[in-house]
Amino acid sequence: MRSIKKYLVLMSVAIFGILQQLQAQSDLQISKAFDQYGERKGVVMVELTNEMLDGYDFSLFKSITIKDNPTASEFIRKCLAKDEIGAKKVKQVISNGIPTSTYLQLPHKGQLFRLILFSETFKPESKITLIYIESKNDSEDVLKLILKRK
Amino acid sequence: MSDYQFKAEILPIRDKLFHIAQKILAEEQEAEDAVQEVLLKLWHMRDSLNKYDNTAAFATTVTKNHCMDRLKMIRRTDSLDDTYNSRAGTDNPYLQLERKNTEEVLQQIIENLPTLQQAIIRMKDMEEYEVEEIAEITGTKVEAVRVNLSRARKKVREEYLKWTTR
Amino acid sequence: MKIINQHSGNYEEIDRLIDRYYEGLTSSEEEKQLRNLLSRKDLPESYKPEQVIFGYFETKKQKRIFMLQPYLRWGTAVAAIVIMAFNLQVFMPTNASNYAFIDGKKTTNVDDIKMHALASLNNVSCDNEEVEKSFDSLNDKEIMKEQLDAFSGLAE
């Protein structure tokens, strides 16, 4: 009887582990934005893995910049609204009633910090930028560095 | 209840259970066997022991009931020495065995063993516990378990040969 | 030690173990050994009782655990493999995943890619004044909304 119990415990731990893994992979709505718009005209999409960018160390860097596409803007905002839930809104800039910049700190994936950076401009041209970052460095440090760019 | 919990909660009250057994069964050896049987019974139901608020009280009840059953058995027998045949019933046990196949015969033989020997031989030969583990669970010395195991095994062989050489 | 079975020839090991068995001295390991020895087909008749008895106990053992054990063993094995596969995917450095799509055209030139990455960072960044306020929000752990007319456009 003892060995059967041991196996049952092992099994449930294993199944639980699998479920955890599945969750971590597919929990972001914004990934749809990358899938849908990444390879279109007027779009620049970037993915970097385990690379240094201007002195910052990223495990994963994904960005997409879309020009002149109000539908995409609407879509991305909807995705963001969902991913915002459970995340910490580090900063949001609102202009004329709508958010033009949003910085989100997502719940950790294991030891990795996760950030979403979003910004939309209307002058001189309509441009929407969405960035997803995974980093081993403290997210506060990463954010400081990014925010200090200008 | 885990193995560890059993050893920590049930074994310490063995003495108390022994005294209850002795009050009912009078004879020391009888009481000793009864307590070991009770502990093995409780061990095999340890998974469901947690639902009792007071496991000590439950163990006491089990002991009382078990000893009362034992008492009834003892009073029924004519010969106190020949426990085996008395348990098998008043009919000739070998006539009963005639129509059965080997597996059924052995099952019958084992079921006719004294309760404690039966429990021990099952734990060793079927459940593959070590003698040391059985001694720990029953709160006895390894030698005591060995003796019971030896008697049980020899009896099984003896009865089996009786059946085959009739 | 009482000797129950005595045979000539090369059955010494079996006889020894059988004696120990009836004295209750054998460990589970030794009993396994004995079972293997007894499963030989060419043994003399005199070993029949032990063969039968051991055979009986074997069937009792197998019946008890046969029901669940194979499935549980395979289940945990499969589960373990799946977890490992996931772990490899997640934690193994996939260095090959550096690319950029510009107007639908793919490039794997890391320098180009980095250039575009930095450009996108510039798009979302802000000036120093805002940086100070961001620190506050990080420290306060509050949700903060700011209305900044001066900030209605970015790239200046």
Image (cartoon, helix red, strand yellow):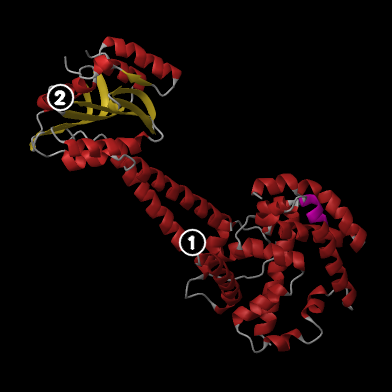
* Residue type indicated by callout 1: Gln
- The image shows residue A45, relative to residue A101, as above or below, that is below
* Residue type indicated by callout 2: Lys
Residue A142 position, x and y percent, is 31, 20
Question: Label 2, on which residue?
Answer: C114
Q: Is residue B122 left or right of residue C149?
A: right
What range is drawn magenta here? B55-60
Q: Residue at x 14, y 33 (%)?
A: C99
- In the rendered structure, does residue A147 fall within the stretch colored magenta? no
Q: Is residue C34 left or right of residue A30?
A: right
Circle 2 marks a residue in which chain? C
Q: Residue at x 78, y 46 (%)?
A: B12
Q: Is residue A48 left or right of residue A16?
A: left
Q: Residue at x 28, y 10 (%)?
A: C128
Question: Label 1, on which residue?
Answer: C69
Which quadrant is the C terminus of chain B positioned in? Answer: bottom right
Q: Secondary structure at mark 1?
A: helix
Q: Residues within 10 Å of mark 2 (few under 14, many from 20)?
A: many
Q: Is residue C124 left or right of residue B95?
A: left
Q: Residues within 10 Å of mark 1 (few under 14, many from 20)?
A: some
Q: Is residue C126 visible?
A: no
Circle 1 marks a residue in which chain? C
Mostly what secondary structure, the magenta segment? helix
